[in-house]
Structure formats: structure tokens, C-alpha cells
Image: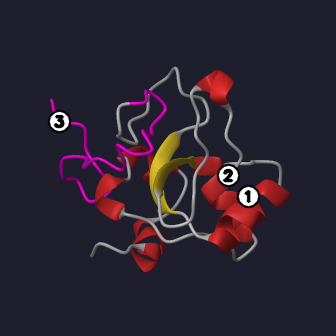
Amino acid sequence: MAILNVLGEPLEPCSMKPLTGFYRDGFCNTGPDNPGIHAVCIYATESFLEFSKAVGNDLSTPRPEYRFEGVKPGQSWCLSGPRFVQALAHARAPNIFIRATHEKMLELVDIDTLKAYALDL
């Protein structure tokens, strides 16, 4: 059974470098063992990374103990769904790659909003 994106198509990879995803397989796949719902593939910008750090989700600082290199502007990353919703509420949401965004995001954000932020439509 195929894992689907929010468009009902097979989920595409988000990033292999840096290697992203809750399961560190390059995909924004999620499951019951992923309470943070790391399901939305974002395009990181300096502005978004600064915002994320300011609200307590530092994605840019390397954490070698977790084999985490830190996300840099211009890279793709599987962001937590609730963090994306938080960014939306502050009008700071990043653009996304909708074809690499897991269908689980539809439980948090409507398809029209996701399409408005999509870079790959």
C-alpha cells in the first residue's frame, strides 16, 4: 500500500541531504510513534529559521549527538505539523513542497491553505 501525500498521490521524498523525516529516510512519513507529526516538507528560509528558533524550535543549530547537522536556508526539511500551524498563526509559515507532504497534514491544515504555500504545483 502506497504512502500518500495531501494530493492523494504517492508521497515524494523531501530531502536526502540533509537527511530528514521522523524516520530519517528522506520522507515526511508519519505514524503513531511520531507524536509531533513531522509530515510537512518545508523550504527553509533564513526568516523562517529565525522565527522557529525564537519560538523554541531551533532547527538551525547543529546537534551532533542526534546526528543533526542543522537546517540551512534553501534546504528542505520535514517540519512538525503543529509547528507549521503555529507559523501559520503568526503569518510566518514557510513555503512547502506539497508532493512531499504526508496526507496526515490534512487533519491539521486544509488543502487550500497547503496549496497556497506550495512551491511545486
Q: Position of residue 97 (x, y in %)?
A: 37, 63
Residue at image x 35%, y 50%? Answer: 14
**What amino acid type is highlighted by mark number 1?**
Ser
- In the displayed structure, does residue 101 sit left or right of residue 94? left
> Which image quarter: residue 115?
bottom left
* 54 versus 94 height, above or below: above
**What amino acid type is highlighted by mark number 3?**
Ala
Q: Which residues make up the magenta segment? A: 1-24
Residue at disc 1, secondary structure: helix
Q: Nearer the viewer, mark 3 or mark 2?
A: 2
Whether residue 16 is visible to the viewer of this picture, yes or no, is: yes
- In the displayed structure, does residue 107 sit left or right of residue 5? right
* Residue indicated by mark 1: 52
* Residue indicated by mark 3: 2
Residue at disc 2, secondary structure: loop
Q: Position of residue 44 (x, y in %)?
A: 54, 64
Q: Nearer the viewer, mark 3 or mark 1?
A: 1
* 98 versus 27 height, above or below: below
Residue at image x 74%, y 48%? Answer: 58
Q: Which mark is residue 60?
A: 2
Q: CA distance from mark 1 to mark 2?
A: 9 Å
* Residue 39 located within the stretch drawn in magenta: no
Q: Earlier in the sequence, mark 3 or mark 2?
A: 3
Give whichever of 106, 52 is nearer the camera: 52
Q: Earlier in the sequence, mark 3 or mark 1?
A: 3
Q: Are marks 1 and 2 in contact (CB under 8 Å)?
A: yes
